[in-house]
Image: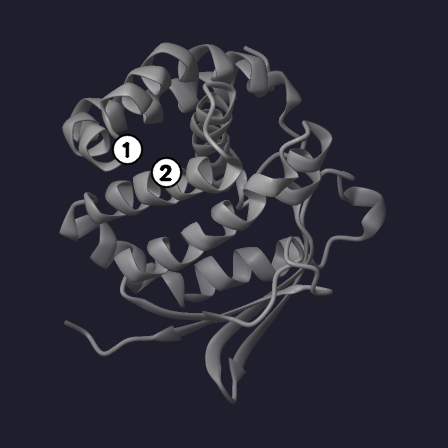
Amino acid sequence: MTLSGRRLGRMVAMYSKAMGSLGADIETLIGKARYEAVVGGAPAEMERLAPTLPEIGRGNPFEGTIVTAAVLTAIGRTLVSSGDPVGSAGEAMLGIARLFYGSLPRAATLAMRALFFTPFFVGRHERWSRRPDRARSPGDWRLEVRRDQADCDVRIDFLECALLKWLTSIGSRELCPYLCATDHESAKAFGLVFRREGTLAGGADRCDCRYSRRAAP
C-alpha cells in the first residue's frame, strides 16, 4: 500500500471513530445543518487531501500529527465549501478537537503524560531535529529541542512547519492558526503545562513551544 493509501486509511478510521462516539456532541456543537454538511462532504474531502500530504520521512515522530491535522482540515474545508466563513469553520475544527481530546480514556492520557518527558520521547525528537538538511524532506518540520530550560522542562522551537507549508500549498493557509490552537487542547488533555508566545502561522520566526510538568492529579 502506498503512503497516501495508508494515511487515508488512518484518516478514515480516526474520522469514523470520532463521528461514531462524538457525533451527537459534534452536532450540538456546530448545529444540524453544518453537521450534515460535514457528514456529506468530509469523507470525499479526505480522499482529495490524502495525496497532497507532504512526505516527511519514514519514522517521523510527527506522522500522527499529519493525519490528525488532515482530518480536521477536511472538516474545515468542507464547512468553508458549504458557506461557512473561515473563522467559523476554524472554530468548529478547534471545538471538535477539544471534544476528541476530552474524550480520550484517562488511562491513555495518564500514559501520555508519563511518557512525554522521558528520554525515549524527548530523545526521539532530539534525534530527528539533528538530521542534516540533505536527509530532510522539504515538506518536513525543522526544529530545535532543548531540555531543562529556566521556564519549562522541554522547549521545542519549530523553525519550519510541515502543516503551514502544506496548507499554503492547497490554498488553506488561513486554517493553520486553528490547527496551532489544538496544541493547547492536547496538552491540557495530557496534563501538561503548555505555553507558546508566537507561531510561524502568526508571523513569528518560530513556534516556541514550552512544555512543563503539572502536579500529578
189 up-or-down from 104: above or below: below
- Tell me how many marks there are: 2
Residue marked by disc 1: 30
Residue 92 bears which disc, if any?
2
57 up-or-down from 82: above or below: below
Residue 11 bears which disc, if any?
none
- Residue at (36, 20) in percent of width and height: 38
Disc 1 to disc 2, C-alpha distance: 6 Å
Assign a secondary structure to mark 2: helix
In x, y percent, where is residue 49? Answer: 57, 20
| Position of residue 14 in the picture relative to residue 172 (left or right) | left
**Foreground: 203 or 208?**
203
Residue 60 visible somewhere in the drawing: no
Residue count near mark 1 (Cα–Cα under 10 Å), binned few <14, some 14–19, many ≥20: some
Q: Quadrant of the N terminus?
A: top right
Instruction: Answer with mark 1 or mark 2, whichever residue precedes in sequence.
Output: 1
**Foreground: 132 or 13?**
13
Label 1 close to label 2 by CB (< 8 Å): yes
In x, y percent, where is residue 47? Answer: 51, 12
- Residue at (42, 13) in percent of width and height: 41
Residue count near mark 2 (Cα–Cα under 10 Å), binned few <14, some 14–19, many ≥20: many
Q: Quadrant of the C terminus?
A: bottom left
- Residue at (62, 33) in percent of width and height: 172
Question: Which kind of residue does numbered mark 1 sit on?
Answer: Ile
